[in-house]
Amino acid sequence: MSQDKMRHYQGVLSAVHTLEYPYTRSVGTVIGTFLAGLREGRILGTRTARGEVLVPPSEFDPITSETLTDMCDVADTGSVTTWSWVSEPRAKHPLQSPFAWALIRLDGAATAMLHVVAAPGEASMKTGMRVKVRWREERKGMITDIECFEPIDSTPGARV
């Protein structure tokens, strides 16, 4: 653009634009069944032809691309596979006291799921530590029905 034409455009050009997605997403049969299980206090995964259980469940086998429909229960206990400590939670975090984001492999599952661990402090977090679900009192069929995971001692029934 020439210098003369640029002198005529000294104001800021603006336009109103609204970006929206006017549709509702369906969760489908597999995730819908998983969420319904959470509402009932159960954790479900999908079993592959190899016998591995994927949690959270998947509609397709990540290796063979086969459709997966065999849903099965897994335990509400598991092991931390990796974690990251949050010392200063933000307003939209699931817990308002320090916690860990963690990948947790539930007993009976071949894969890990991301959730939070309400540990007493960063020093108490360890890869391999055992954790158990703390269920929300009022469940709605959402991933937040799992309020968090809590550390458990290796002694059955004991909590840290």
Image (cartoon, rainbow, N blue to C red):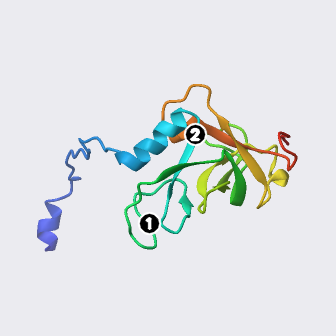
- Mark 1 Cα-neighbour bin, 10 Å: few <14, some 14–19, many ≥20: some
> Element type at marker 2?
loop
Q: Which residue of the protein is positioned furthest toward the right in this rendering?
A: 155
Q: Which mark is residue 132?
A: none
Q: Nearer the viewer, residue 91 or 44?
A: 44
Q: Give percent across and percent down for residue 64.
A: 42, 73
Q: Amino acid at mark 2?
A: Arg
Residue 63 lies, with reference to residue 118, above or below; the image says below
Q: Which residue of the protein is positioned furthest toward the top in this rendering?
A: 138
Report which quarter residue 126 is drawn in. bottom right
Q: Nearer the viewer, residue 69 or 41?
A: 69
Q: Residue at x 56, y 35 (%)?
A: 145
Q: Nearer the viewer, residue 68 or 129?
A: 68
Q: Report the number of discs.
A: 2
Quarter of the picture containing the N terminus is bottom left
Q: Which residue is mark 1?
A: 61
Q: Give percent across and percent down for residue 116.
A: 65, 47
Q: Residue at x 21, y 50 (%)?
A: 14
Q: Which residue is mark 2?
A: 42
Q: Give percent across and percent down for residue 39.
A: 52, 33
Q: What is the CA distance from the residue labelled 2 to the residue labelled 1?
A: 22 Å
Quarter of the picture containing the C terminus is top right
Q: Amino acid at mark 1?
A: Asp
- Mark 2 Cα-neighbour bin, 10 Å: few <14, some 14–19, many ≥20: some
Q: Residue at x 57, y 44 (%)?
A: 43
> Element type at marker 1?
loop
Q: Residue at x 28, y 41 (%)?
A: 24
Horizontally, residue 77 falls left or right of residue 156, namely left
